[in-house]
Amino acid sequence: MGLATFRGGVHPFEGKELSMERAVTLLKPTSGEMVYPLSQHIGAPAKPLVQVGDEVLVGQKIAEAGGFISAVVVCSVSGKVKKLEPRTMANGSKVMSIIVENDGAYRAVEHFGADRDPLSLSKQEIRDIVREAGIVGLGGAGFPTNVKLTPKDENAIDYVIVNGAECEPYLTCDYRMMLEEPERLIGGLKVMLQLFEHAKGVIGVENNKPKAIEVLRGLVKDEPRIEVAELLTKYPQGGERSLIYAVTGREINSSMLPADAGCVVDNVNTVMAVYDAVCKNTPIVERVLTITGDAIANPQNFRVRTGMNYNDIIAAAGGFRNEPQKILSGGPMMGQAMFTTDVPVTKNSSSLTCFTVDEVAKNPETPCIRCGRCGEVCPEFLVPVLMMKECMRRNAEGYEKLNGMECIECGSCSYICPARRPLTQAFKYMKREVGAIRRAKAAEAKAKAEKETAGAGKGSEKK
Ligand code: SF4
Ligand code: SF4
């Protein structure tokens, strides 16, 4: 039997050799300004709990979750709150942020880092700890983890899947962490399995990481509830839907959550963060990221504090070897082009990838030759060439009819297209447009229903 995988997908140049042998190095800012955006997660922005002039400590909650789908923000240094003002994020948006002057002393809140036995905790206590630690999907999605760990029916969860695929080219931080700190990963998974008594834990790892598979298999050989699934190396194997399908054979679509298919999926960094929060009383104050690409002097994997400036990370990696033509937050397939590196590390900063050549700018778009390759590689069974036609006509209805909202923006179609058509970019834009139309329609329907209810009320008063 072949290795677990999914339909479609592509095999881009991996580029992982640049940093995969580089052990994770701690990079501690000595002093200076730290920036904590209030939106580093999916959902409502967090609400600040501090004011200008306040003294803060490592591990201190400085912003409260702004709703059910939201996340706490925790300070990663000690110092003084300098300002509250909008700052530019890696994706180019301006987000209200808490600016702290780091005093370099790293004074922490009481009991920070203290051991805690997870078996002494109730399920609710574990979920509360995860929420208060500010943990979100650290693979880039930023979805609040405590919400993921609180499905409607916890007995319906059959699988807790750890996403160790790291299918995005060039990225190696998850690989290094699986290799260097596998006990933290297994510890975090065990805590999660405590919440779902009927579930099995599966760590999915692509077969281009044989050392990690060997280490993890050795550690779980006597763990009846945990196994390691070796996955075929293929992009986007780490996409949530692709991973669920490869591991369980179950399928989800855009109107479903993984829990609807009996699954909870979390990335390696996230599961380790759950371990730190629950077993070591350590909220999210740092993460591991990869800085790589042919423009970087010394590509590597760093453990960095949230709030640090990307420019400090570039400097610590020896700066630029050559002038970068393209800088991405994330990897080459799903990363976002950056126009400035003067931005803070957030919880979901997985990598900084810098290239000396911008392939897109170098190879301009040509007309579609109707080769059909884009459809062959699409993991969602979509027909990108037709979706693109609707995008060009700005026909949101036509795009929806082609199931365009099921696009996971993986970039496989753009990658394979010989005409270098900007398919994924067009789909991202159109999905936002359709989303806005749907929201406007829903608001209109709600207003109409409220008006009718109010009218009916007046009618009954008259009677
Ligand atoms: S891969 Fe590109 S050229 Fe081929 S059909 Fe799709 S859009 Fe057209
Ligand atoms: S249409 Fe969307 S899901 Fe399909 S390959 Fe293109 S980007 Fe990926």
Image (tube, rainbow, N blue to C red):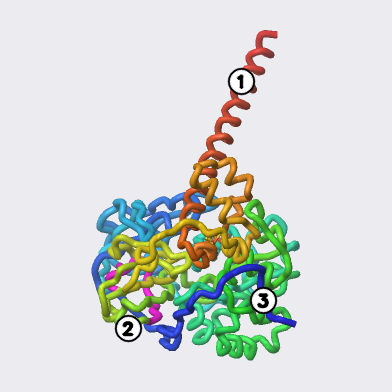
Marks 1 & 3, CB-CB < 8 Å contact: no
Residue at 57% over, 62% down: 371
The kind of residue tagged 2 is: Asn
Extent of the magenta region: 300-312
Q: Quadrant of residue 109?
A: bottom left
Q: Nearer the viewer, residue 222 or 300?
A: 300
Ligand 2: quadrant of the figure: bottom right
Q: Quadrant of residue 463?
A: top right
Callout 1: SS: helix
The kind of residue tagged 1 is: Ala
Badge 2 is on which residue?
A: 298
Badge 1 is on which residue?
A: 454
The kind of residue tagged 3 is: Val
CA gap, disc 3 and disc 2: 34 Å
> x and y percent of residue 142 in the render?
49, 61
> x and y percent of residue 397 in the render?
58, 40
